[in-house]
Amino acid sequence: MDSQTKAKTALERSVADGSSWEAFCDQLRATGRQVQRAEAASSPLDQAEGYRYLARIARTALETFVEFNDPEFPVIYRPSDEIIKIGGDNPDNCYQKCVVDAKREYRIRGRRNTVYYLSFISQGNNYGKDGTMLCTGFLDGNDLEVEADGRFEIHIGCERRSGNWLPLTEQSQALLIRQTFAYRDREQLADLEIECLDAGAAPAPLEAAQFARNLAAAGQFFDGTVRLFCDWSAHYQEHRNQLPLADQELCQRVGGDPNILYYNSYWQLAPDEALVVELDSVPDCEYWNFQLCNYWLESLDYRYYRIHLNKFTATANADGSVRIVVAHRDPGVANWLSTAGHDCGTMLFRWVGLADREGIVHPQTRVVAVDSLAASAVATDQ
């Protein structure tokens, strides 16, 4: 029996005797201790959200590596949504993903509809391997060739094609699609479907050895994702209530959009404090947004609380500047964001499609007494 056959037999045995499942459960248990790190937020709310976060990441890990892991019959699914949230998910985004094989060719057929921003990235690696999710190809939705009725096709593969082409390389394993709303309640997402151009008639029956490999990959992704973003939250505490420019190379290594400039940090406020985030001006850009997250880098629940603003939803001052106020209660001023019951967490600011990165405007922050904001608002009204 050759080594490959022996390895397959061992994997099949691990499914039959339950050891592959036990190893997956052991991985969940071991990684779960990250919630108890000494520097982690320790309130009952933060700890409950921490364990809920583990359950959510386990769900998306299983979907990614067990349910939707056949590159011959790819499925576009949502790895992060209004419930499952990863790494500072943008509340204005619909994230979509599917697995691919660099040896194959694919075609996306779609209709552009009215969503404000659209981008496609091919990716190599995943957080379960070395904490990276490298961009191996990029297609900006602004560059799409679209028919008069809004329909388009995208060829996906290693071989360059005319028209809309999303490159793959030998390292490519997945596609990540970002659809970004200016106004979520007014726009329609692009309709997308994908097919493998050399697929068979139907998927093969589930193989035990492949299931064991997929389950192990899900456990590794779970561990890598949780550890990566717990490390980020710990690092951000070094500059709490500030918004320094992030390491852009690092952001790209973990799956960032090349069109985006990121600022990541940590916020913490007493009951009588407010965090003021100010832009002296807004440079020429497609879009910007600012958002609040909990300690685990999950966006706060934007379904029920106003926890983010963007270029279109924020109220600007007469001189073009913008002031955003983060506080536990409404101080009666424009651009107030709720902390949704939290006293600390993480936060992000994004510039998207800056026309001139040399002329960038950096957000400035300061902490003030929340009553001083209410008093200034009354004085202004008088």
Image (cartoon, helix red, strand yellow):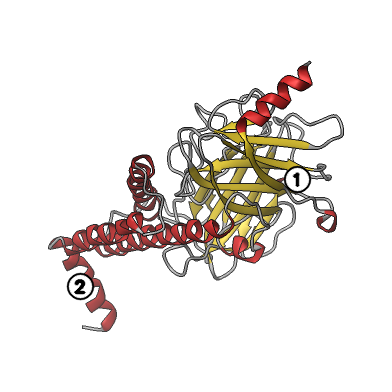
- Which class describes the residues within 10 Å of circle 2: few (<14), some (14-19), or many (20+)? some
Number of marks in the rendered image: 2
The correct choice, above or below, for 352 with respect to 245 in the image is above
The N terminus - image quarter: bottom left
Q: Residue furthest top?
A: 382
Q: Position of residue 202 (x, y in %)?
A: 38, 49
| Residue found 56% across the figure and 52% down from its top | 176
**Quarter-of-image position of residue 13:** bottom left
Q: Position of residue 374 (x, y in %)?
A: 66, 25
Please name the residue shown 56% across and 54% down the image.
Answer: 106
Q: Residue at x 56, y 41 (%)?
A: 292
The one nearer the camera, 226 or 213, is: 226
Give the residue type that dot 1 points to: Asn
Give the left or right position of residue 168, taking residue 363 as reference.
left
**Sequence-earlier tag: 1 or 2:** 2
Residue that mark 2 sits on: 10
Residue type beneath disc 2: Ala
Please say whether residue 188 is visible from this viewpoint.
Answer: no
Horizontal relation, residue 362 to residue 12: left or right: right
As displayed, is residue 136 above or below residue 118?
below
- Judged from the image, the secondary structure of the residue bearing numbered disc 1 is helix
Residue 307 in percent (x, y) is at 57, 34
In the rendered structure, find residue 119 and report the number of the disc placed on it. Answer: none
Gap between marks 1 and 2, in whole Å?
49 Å
Residue neighbourhood size for the residue with mark 1, other residues' Cα within 10 Å, grouped as few (<14), some (14–19), many (≥20): few
Q: Which residue in the structure is indicated by mark 1?
A: 142
Q: Look at the image and tell me in which quarter the C terminus lies.
A: top right
Q: Position of residue 36 (x, y in %)?
A: 32, 56
